[in-house]
Image (spheres, coloured by chain):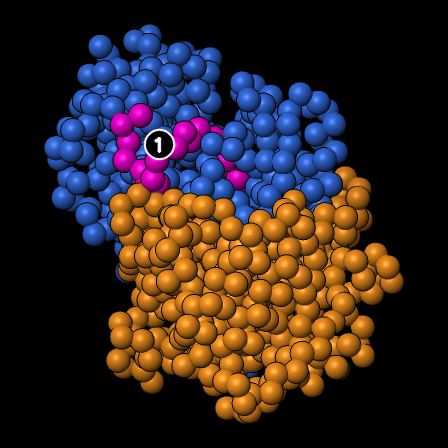
Chain colours: A orange, B blue
Amino acid sequence: MSRSIRLAVIPGDGIGPEVVAQGLKVLGAALPSDVRLTTTEYDLGARRWHATGETLPDAELASLAGHDAILLGAVGDPSVPSGVLERGLLLKLRFAFDHYVNLRPARLLPGTATPLAGDPRIDFVVVREGTEGPYTGNGGSLRTGTPAEVATEVSVNTAYGVERVVRDAYERAQARPRKKLTLVHKNNVLVHAGHLWKNVFDAVGREYPEVTTDYLHVDAATIFFVTQPERFDVIVTDNLFGDILTDLAAAVTGGIGLAASGNINPAGTYPSMFEPVHGSAPDIAGSGKADPTATVLSVALLLRHLGYEAQAARVEDAVAADVAARDGSVRSTDEVGDALVARVTA
Amino acid sequence: MSRSIRLAVIPGDGIGPEVVAQGLKVLGAALPSDVRLTTTEYDLGARRWHATGETLPDAELASLAGHDAILLGAVGDPSVPSGVLERGLLLKLRFAFDHYVNLRPARLLPGTATPLAGDPRIDFVVVREGTEGPYTGNGGSLRTGTPAEVATEVSVNTAYGVERVVRDAYERAQARPRKKLTLVHKNNVLVHAGHLWKNVFDAVGREYPEVTTDYLHVDAATIFFVTQPERFDVIVTDNLFGDILTDLAAAVTGGIGLAASGNINPAGTYPSMFEPVHGSAPDIAGSGKADPTATVLSVALLLRHLGYEAQAARVEDAVAADVAARDGSVRSTDEVGDALVARVTA
Ligand SMILES: CC(C)[C@H](C(=O)O)[C@@H](O)C(=O)O
Ligand SMILES: CC(C)[C@H](C(=O)O)[C@@H](O)C(=O)O
């Protein structure tokens, strides 16, 4: 646990800068006073692309690499062709910095409105693979734009890549009271990738005899997310299934306004990156309506990753208390941030 | 509308035969008395595979092709390695018979229990592509079972394949009161396939000026399924996204006990196949607990496909009335079938 933190900040587009500002406020309030926090801001995203055509120049990638962690708001705008910023910036960062653990907790905090009936108990975490699967950019298009076009997308899965994320998931399951790990895939159709995942999952599992395991096809998993979410403890899954499942998980735990994520390089060879699951929401940008809570919870993940466990818990407790105290009155982005700072420093 | 129907029946495994028996009962009751229904049963599935090692021999495939339609219960059993029956039987049928429209209605019938809070209105239909995408079986594994394994899955998408299913979806949207069609994909990451889908969707849309269109990433779509399902009318999507979304759709409309599907060859070059979305549920096979309603609703889709619109509506009305009258008392598979027959013939 270092006494100085060099944090790279990518506010991004839309509501990104607004929620990041609150995240930084809470981070500053939570850190012990003797910890020296220095932040470097990077102007990356839609505005930059429009101005210069650049998404993530090599020099900036190298500069980002010299930090202890990255906090990202959101990138993307309808004015930019779909895929340009996702592939050229967000996924480029995840791949370049080998963020093979995409960590996405799903907790229904008391007092949160959920679209589910009854009073579901939801407290699980999704360990989404972050550097393989259908996200590798493999594939292409032949005779593009003609009636004879063929477009392919290749999901690439390696024993190396699957083993390390599966192991990380077992470690997390082992450390939780319920010690249960569910593999989600679609091995009855995607037989090659699916069998690789299942074989590795079973093999690594032999090293964790205390962890109870389970397998679900991704389609069946979505059913249990809404009918029996309490059955999940830790889920490990591929990049695309993880993308889909964590939006659904966010929806049932109160919405993407509350969903945090960490793109983690557990080896520490590159900085890990923390970001809310939500997008840039250009429709509400500038209106002060954005809920910064997902970013603040991402800051908690950042604190935990850097070794500040007590501070991470303090931020999470502040969020839980804030959510429990919500009475339906409308607060601005800034007011929510202030309320969280007040609770963290109380 | 022919006065004779040659129906191929594949009861399959687990609860498959039990629910198919009820489906046939209702079919017989719904058809006009002068329609000659002949059924041929095919012994395909786990039992057959264990006994002979066969999944779907060419002779049987050819024989199935000589029918007007196929009714399938469910195939699969934990005793069969994952993928064997899915790829060797179920998907083989969908591909051999060019079932490019996988039609999956999602309606929340009054009186049905839904895991969603409030009183959601759900009435949409998913047009899932059935012959391309990640389901083609392209891909493979290198150095299988070693720490150096690489496994790939290739999603194959053609303008030909996308155009025909997108057109079918526009036709369906055009015929519905709301005339709204949503494309679901992930074109910010799967840029090649995604752009093909989006370009074809936009191009075909110019021929349907009355249809309102919309695009959603698959992850965002799952959120709206639970928070705002009323926003959907017709959805068109790829094979894998459609698989995932329709299980979720089934979950929010009362469970897979009620979810019907048609694997349709609109050109009529091969028989279309109708099946419940649920699996073989070996845990409850033989107990009389299986709900045959999904199969009966699949029979309604079959009737409509063969031109018996009035009879299809009668079966659907019978199901709606049965569901509305449910009082929580437990009925056997057979009792539900009898109740539906009684309503259809009333
Ligand atoms: C924006 C997009 C590339 C991204 C993803 O698909 O991973 C997002 O949906 C997420 O979940 O972080
Ligand atoms: C059994 C499996 C191959 C199948 C699919 O993935 O299509 C099923 O989930 C379905 O939705 O009909």
Circle 1 is placed at which residue position?
B119
Q: Position of residue B52 (x, y in %)?
A: 32, 55
Q: In this view, does B205 lie to the left or right of B34?
A: right
For residue B98, say whether it is visible: no
Examine the rendered structure and indicate whether residue B21 appears above or below residue B195: above
Query: Label 1 crowding class (10 Å Cα cut-off): few <14, some 14-19, many 20+?
Result: few
Determine the main secondary structure of the stretch shown in magenta.
loop
Q: Is residue A185 left or right of residue A25?
A: left
Position of residue B24 relative to residue A36, above or below, is: above
Along the viewing direction, whichever of A36 and A52 lies nearer the viewer: A36
Q: Which chain's residue wears label 1?
A: B
Q: Which residue is drawn at 72% across and 73% down?
A: A41
Q: Does the magenta stretch include residue A44?
A: no
Residue at the spot 76% in from the left edge and 67% down from the top edge: A43
Find residue A50 and report its image quarter.
bottom right
Q: Nearer the viewer, residue B70 or B274?
A: B274
Question: Which of A323 and A8 lies nearest the eye of the viewer?
Answer: A323
Residue plotted at (41% across, 25% down):
B301
- Left or right: residue B170 versus residue B92 is right
Q: Residue type at mark 1? A: Asp
Q: In which quarter of the image is residue B323?
A: top left
For the point 81% across and 62% down, the residue is A48
Does residue B172 show up?
yes
Q: Is residue B57 left or right of residue B143?
A: left
Q: Where is residue A95 in the image (x, y as percent from the top left)?
A: 65, 73
Q: Report helix, strand or loop for mark 1.
A: loop
Instruction: Reply above or below: B24 against A82.
Output: above
Magenta residue span: B110-131
A35 up-or-down from B7: above or below:
below
Q: Residue B116 appears at what percent x and percent y?
A: 35, 40
